[in-house]
Image: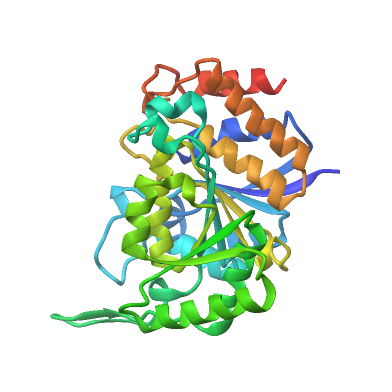
Amino acid sequence: MSHHIVTLPGDGIGPEIMAPTLQLLQTVGEFEFEEHLFGGAAIDAHGTALTDETLAACRRSDAVLLAAVGGPKWDTTDPGKPRPEQGLLGLRKGLGLYANLRPVKPLPALYPASPLRGEVIEGTDLLVVRELTGGIYFGEKTRTATTASDLCSYSTEEIERIARVAFGAARRKVTSVDKANVLETSRLWREVVTQLHAREFADVELEHVLVDNAAMQLVSNPRDFDVIVTENMFGDILSDEAAMLTGSIGMLPSASLSGGGSGPHPALFEPVHGSAPDIAGTGQANPLAMFLSAAMLLRHGLGLESEAAAVESAVEGALAAGLRTPDLGGPADTAQATKAVIAHLE
């Protein structure tokens, strides 16, 4: 059976890491790929970061694989001009992608690459569950010549559904992150999570941590975390901080799910890094986060667990054998990294 995947290479290094990822996927299964312009590339061609045609194609697919969007070419503070990031927000809304999963598990081979000491990150295996479609990013916005505002709003339903994903993924503990000492939205968040825990997930430990404290704990004692669940903006910041525990943001995958993975729309899979326009076209891009995003696609998007595990093992095996891209302090270019991982896969 062939699986239909929409690919969105996007901008910068996006096309350079998408091509080897499709090569990798074809070694573990049968797939039909349908490519569409997205982000800055779509702005250049169509005047918008996400066309109706692309969104419709994504909705028809079994899964969506995205590489990277953005770059200085499209940076603007003019609210009337399109930005590549608007494509991401539109895709999340259009596909109902409310749950972003970012696993963080530093590999022993890369402990020396982490900015933290090996004994601090050793044993770290955490998952950040970020709410994706609510909060300040989607609230009403106002702008005058001298003032601006962004409304942060959450409903009980939005909080409960993301908390349910977090509790379902937990092995031992859920850390709910908020700013309940200051924000009314956070007070509602804490109440709803507490009530859901008591009602349905009392066997899982629950702790509430203020976001500033959570940021400190992530770098002082990361292995204490199991699952972190939080709202959109806090999750955006904390997941990038957690990503650096691995030594490079070029190593982290992510999945964005609807309905906890069983909703009416396909899920979206993408690396957490940006489009890295400074190295675009040089062949130096690290494709490993994209490979690991493909593994998440296999597992969460298509239910192909053994194939997903094989890809993850191949990446870990290549790193253990000495593979290092420039961001990890080594000489391997994109092509060499791809060859090394596929060799371990075969």
| In this view, 32 is above or below 202 | above
Residue 192: x and y in percent read 54, 80
Quadrant of the drawing holding the N terminus: top right
Q: Residue at x 35, y 46 (%)?
A: 219
Q: Is residue 79 above or below residue 152?
A: above
Q: Position of residue 202 (x, y in %)?
A: 65, 70
Residue 23 appearing in the image? no
- Taking the spot 43% from the left edge, 23% from the top edge, the residue there is 325
Residue sitting at the far right: 1
Q: How is the image coloured?
A: rainbow
Left/right of residue 112 with respect to residue 52 in the rendered view: left
Residue 323 against residue 125 in the figure, above or below = above
User: Can residue 318 be seen in this snapshot?
Assistant: yes
| Residue 4: x %, y % from top left | 74, 49
Q: Is residue 106 above or below residue 71?
A: above
**Split into 4 quadrants, where in the image is the C terminus?**
top right
**Residue drawn where x is 54% and y is 38% of the image:** 290
Q: Is residue 329 left or right of residue 28?
A: left
Residue 15 is situated, as x and y percent measured from the top left of the image, at: 50, 38
- Pick whichever, 48 or 194, lies toward us: 194
Tally the numbered discs.
0
Q: Nearer the viewer, residue 92 or 54?
A: 92
